[in-house]
Amino acid sequence: MNYRNHRKNVVVDGKIGYLGGINIGCEYLGQSSRFGDWRDTHLRLKGESVDSLQYRFLLDWNFAAGSDLLRQQKYFPPKKFKGDSPVQIVSSGPDSKDAEIKSLFLKMIYGAEKSVNIQTPYFIPDQSILEALKLMARSGVDVKIMIPDRGDQPFVYAANNSFVGEILDAGARCYRYTKGFLHSKTICIDSRVLSIGTTNMDVRSFKLNFEINAFIYDKERSEYHDRIFAKDIENSEEITKRVYQKRGWKMKVEESVSRLLSPIL
C-alpha cells in the first residue's frame, strides 16, 4: 500500500513521547505463534523534543480530520524536565520535496570513522544508501547489518538476501537475528550518534511512506545502544561469504525476482 502513514508515535499530556517500531497488536507483544518473540526498539522521550513529536501528530490529525488543533496551547504545556541529550525529531514522506530521513542517514554513514551498526527488518536500500555502506566498508569502517532470519511479507526475505552479497563483498558483516522476529529500525554511528524510529532501510520508507525518526546526538545513549546491539549479535547467526555462497538455486531465483520487485516491496 503506497502513501501510508507508517509513523508510530504517542504523546501523553504533551509531556511524554514515544516513537519507534512497535505497533498495536498481539504480535508486538510476542504473542504470535508465527513470529514468536518480537525484538523491537521504541524510544521514550521527555523535554522539549516532545513538542516536535506533538506537532507532527497534530499536523497529521489536521490533515485527516480537517480541523486545526495547532493553535491550542493545551497541547504544548510548559516543560519542567530539562534533558542533557540533544534530540532532533525528523519526519519525511511523499508530500515533501526532500527525503529528509534518508538524507540524514547518508550524512551519518559518510561521517562514520569507526563503526556503522544497523538493525532493520527490511534491508532493501536504494543505490545511494547501498553505495554509501559499501564505500565505508571498503574504507575500513566496521559496518554491521542485522536483519531477521525470516520474512513477514512475501518476497522480503529473498529481497534482503539479494543485497547481502554485495555488502559482504565490500567487507561489511551481516547477521540474521534468530531469537524471534527482528523489527527494530536503528542506526548508530561511532557510538556517538543514534537514530531510532519507524524508517526501514528500504525504498518504500524513503519514498512512499510517511515516517518519523529521532536522531540522538549523545555518546552515552549511543554506547548503550551498541551494547544492546552486541547482545543481539549473541542471538544471531553471522552470514559469512561461505554461508552465503551455499544458497540453493531456488533461493537464488527467488532473490533475482525479488530484486526486480525491490522498489515496490
Image (cartoon, rainbow, N blue to C red):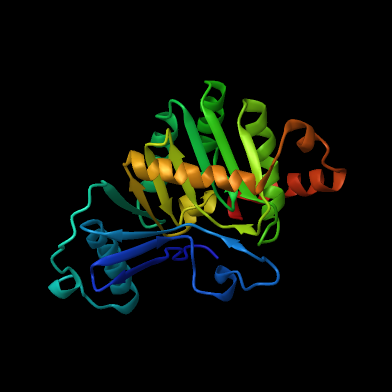
**Residue 125 visible here:** no
Asked whether 198 or 232 is in front, the reply is 232
Residue depicted at 66% across the width and 66% down the height:
36
Residue depicted at 42% across the width and 45% down the height:
224
| Residue furthest to the top | 139
- Horizontal side of residue 115 vs 171, given as left or right: left
Asked whether 28 or 226 is in front, the reply is 226
Please state the total of marks drawn on the protein image: 0
Q: From the viewer's perspective, is residue 179 above or below residue 238?
A: below
Q: Position of residue 229 (x, y in %)?
A: 53, 45
- Horizontal side of residue 221 vs 261, given as left or right: left
Asked whether 33 or 21 is in front, the reply is 33
- Horizontal side of residue 21 vs 39, given as left or right: left
Q: Position of residue 26 (x, y in %)?
A: 57, 75
Please identify the quadrant where the C terminus is shown.
bottom right
Q: Position of residue 152 (x, y in %)?
A: 66, 62
Asked whether 215 or 62 is in front, the reply is 215
**Residue 38 visible here:** yes
Q: From the viewer's perspective, is residue 5 above or below residue 221?
A: below
Please identify the quadrant where the N terminus is shown.
bottom right
| Residue furthest to the right | 249
Residue depicted at 33% across the width and 46% down the height:
216
Q: Position of residue 7 (x, y in %)?
A: 42, 63
Residue depicted at 37% across the width and 45% down the height:
221
